[in-house]
Image (cartoon, grey):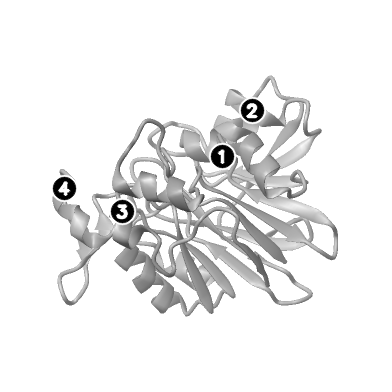
């Protein structure tokens, strides 16, 4: 299993267009980026590739990282920075299965897969393919399991991706706060590589209108507002899940420059062979 981090940033990425904050300027000076979230998972045995989330930066990411176009796609939720790259399938792909959850979202009245089918009904290039959370399915020779996480107000899912022949395992939390259900934690546990959502350090919770949540024993917030884990929360979850290696993703440019490129915080282009 070869994992390439195509996009490791949040909804605006780093550097953020038009931003001259110290973090964005440092990223420019270092020549590193965190584009909108997306992960490429290649199965060397089948020579097929699974794309986890279709970033709006799809075209740039595939040109920059020189990875094969996806054989199949997995979409975690319907926020634009994880979904709208599907439009790039036009003239590039043909009949590619797009796996997504089949549970109805009370907020939208549709499941993720139904929203994809409606939004991209003009695209013959993709085939929306419903999947039931907690029920493993096959994609690119991998065993894939979607798991519910907590990213209000919309439903969102993480995923465990395993190679049944080698035992290699990648877990992706998806966009979530720290209150990941116990059953989902059990599926995500014991990964060779965990990609954990961590948007900012906990000390920035003072600037969020809702503050922080899911405090640890020392009073440190493990959730920023309601939607995303703090970096401390991502590390705490990784410890609970006993991941062999963890990379923190969905990192925003609000992380102070002296913290933004610390060990554990991913940048685009990282590759791992599991």
The residue beneath circle 2 is: 87
Q: Would residue 146 be visible to someone looking at this image?
A: yes
Nearest to viewer (mark 3 / mark 4): 3
Establish if 82 lies above or below 237. Answer: above
Q: Identify the residue shown where x is 45% and y is 45%.
A: 28
Q: In the image, is 220 to the left or to the right of 243?
A: left
Q: Quadrant of residue 102?
A: top right
Q: Mark 3 and mark 1: span between their CA atoms?
A: 21 Å
In terms of sequence position, does the residue under pointer 3 or pointer 1 come before the other?
A: 1
In the picture as drawn, the residue positioned furthest to the right comes out as 46
User: Real-space Cα distance between discs 2 and 1?
Assistant: 10 Å
Q: Residue at x 37, y 45 (%)?
A: 25
* Disc sitting over residue 55 in the figure: 1
**Residue that numbered label 4 is attached to:** 207
Q: Earlier in the sequence, mark 3 or mark 4?
A: 4
Q: Earlier in the sequence, mark 2 or mark 4?
A: 2
> Residue 214: where, in percent of width, then height?
23, 63
Estimate the spatial distance between the alpha carbons at disc 2 and disc 3, rounded to whole Å.
30 Å
Name which of mark 2 and mark 1 comes first in the sequence.
Answer: 1
Q: Which mark, residue 255?
A: 3
- Residue 50 appears at what percent x and percent y? 71, 52
């Amino acid at each position: 299993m070869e994992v390439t981090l195509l996009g490791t940033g949040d909804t605006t990425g780093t550097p953020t267009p038009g931003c001259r904050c110290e973090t964005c300027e440092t990223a420019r000076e270092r020549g590193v980026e965190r584009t909108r979230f997306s992960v490429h998972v290649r199965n060397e045995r089948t020579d097929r590739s699974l794309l986890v989330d279709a970033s709006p930066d799809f075209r740039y990411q595939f040109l920059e990282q020189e990875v094969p176009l996806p054989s199949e796609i997995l979409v975690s939720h319907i926020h634009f920075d994880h979904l709208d790259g599907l439009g790039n399938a036009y003239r590039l792909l043909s009949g590619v299965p797009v796996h997504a959850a089949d549970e109805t979202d009370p907020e939208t009245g549709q499941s993720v897969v139904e929203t994809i089918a409606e939004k991209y009904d003009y695209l013959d290039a993709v085939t929306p393919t419903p999947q039931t959370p907690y029920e493993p399915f096959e994609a690119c020779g991998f065993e894939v399991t979607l798991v519910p996480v907590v990213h209000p107000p919309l439903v969102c899912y993480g995923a465990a991706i395993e190679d049944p022949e080698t035992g290699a395992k990648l877990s992706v939390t998806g966009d979530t706060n720290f209150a990941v259900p116990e059953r989902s934690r059990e599926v995500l546990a014991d990964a060779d590589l965990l990609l954990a959502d961590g948007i900012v350090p906990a000390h920035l919770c003072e600037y969020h209108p809702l503050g922080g949540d899911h405090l640890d024993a020392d009073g440190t917030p493990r959730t920023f507002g309601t939607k995303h884990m703090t970096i401390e929360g991502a590390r705490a979850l990784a410890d609970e899940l006993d991941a062999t290696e963890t990379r923190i993703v969905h990192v925003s440019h609000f992380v102070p420059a002296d913290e933004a490129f610390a060990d554990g915080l991913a940048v685009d282009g990282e590759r791992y062979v599991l």
